Image (cartoon, grey):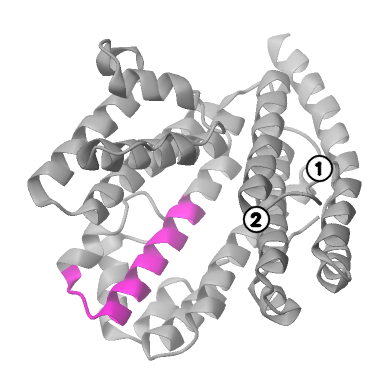
Amino acid sequence: MAKKVKDTEYLMLSSMLRAREAGMLSRERMDRMLSAPSFQEAAKLLTDCGYEDMSSCAAAGVNDALSRRRAAVFAELAGMSPHTEVVDIFRVKYDYHNIKALVKAKAMETDAKRILSDCGRVPAEKLLECVEGEGGLSSLPEDMAAAFAEAQDVLARTGNPQLADFELDRRCFAEQSALAGESGSAFLAGYVRTLIDGANLRAAVRTVRMGKDRAFMLQAMAPGGSADMETVASAAENGEALAAVFNATCLEKAAALGVQAMKGGSMTAFELECDNAVSAYLAGAKMIPFGAEPVAEYLALIESEITAARMILTGRLAGIDAEVIRERLRDINA
């Protein structure tokens, strides 16, 4: 009986989200924002997609408004989804963004409050209290408390904030993998593996571009992808072999561009294709009528939409040419 109830809830939720997708930021809407005569008019066009009016905002105000939009969607769907793990897979990276900021701020004795996000599972204010208050980390989820302590230790031992970030990235992916497993969805497990593969591919290409060694490359990677870390590292060092590692996967084109980027080709094109590969994976959810998959797809579309909206609006504020912004926009499968 419980399964039937959850199936019914997912069916209703999926139908609602499919209907919402029609009003999202399509490529045509993005082009209209880019060709609008002014920033103010571009911002007003975004209200058609359900966003607050940002026409009088500066860059900081745009970022704040878009963060509020994301947090509201996450909170709404967390309350509606039969499995909260689906939403938490998207929320957890904001928890780890906050941990990164607080670890560095504590080491440098600065205030990170302005850059904390309220889009995670743990409210930013609570996380700040746990880090700075007398109660310590004991009231945080166990995994997050351990991650914070380990990142602090790495930074204290090495003095290198990048190595602390690598540690937190690995722990973030591990939590996402665990949440996907708890959800029971093979699609979500595949989504997290795709995220890890994309991150490892990026790490490999960047490491070669910077002239760093294999030890650094492996530190920048995370376990849990479809391709083994050592395999990716060896292929990157070999150069051309990297494309073969991701042959017949959604990252195939990205890997081919990565080979070119390691030789001095465009990093922008490579990075964009890594993002597009994740979108391509999630597009497979369109074939699934209900369940966790349509919820995950919608959340990913919201993330892509907000990224595009930020890029367009802050780009317009900065006076960046429309064609330059357009080249950097990822695919949105709405």
Where residue 169 appears, as percent x and y from the top left, is 35, 47
Where residue 331 appears, as percent x and y from the top left, is 71, 65
Mark 2 / mark 1, whichever is N-terminal: 1
Picture layout, residue 82 above or below residue 106? above
Picture layout, residue 108 above or below residue 142? below
**In magenta stretch: residue 152:** no
Which residue matches tag 2? 307
Q: Quadrant of the C terminus?
A: bottom right
Q: Main secondary structure of the magenta part?
A: helix
Residue nearest the viewer, comparing 113 with 147 = 113
Q: Which mark is residue 24?
A: none
Q: Is residue 23 visible?
A: no
Picture quadrant of residue 142:
top left
CA distance separating discs 2 and 1? 13 Å
**In magenta stretch: residue 211:** yes
Picture quadrant of residue 218:
bottom left
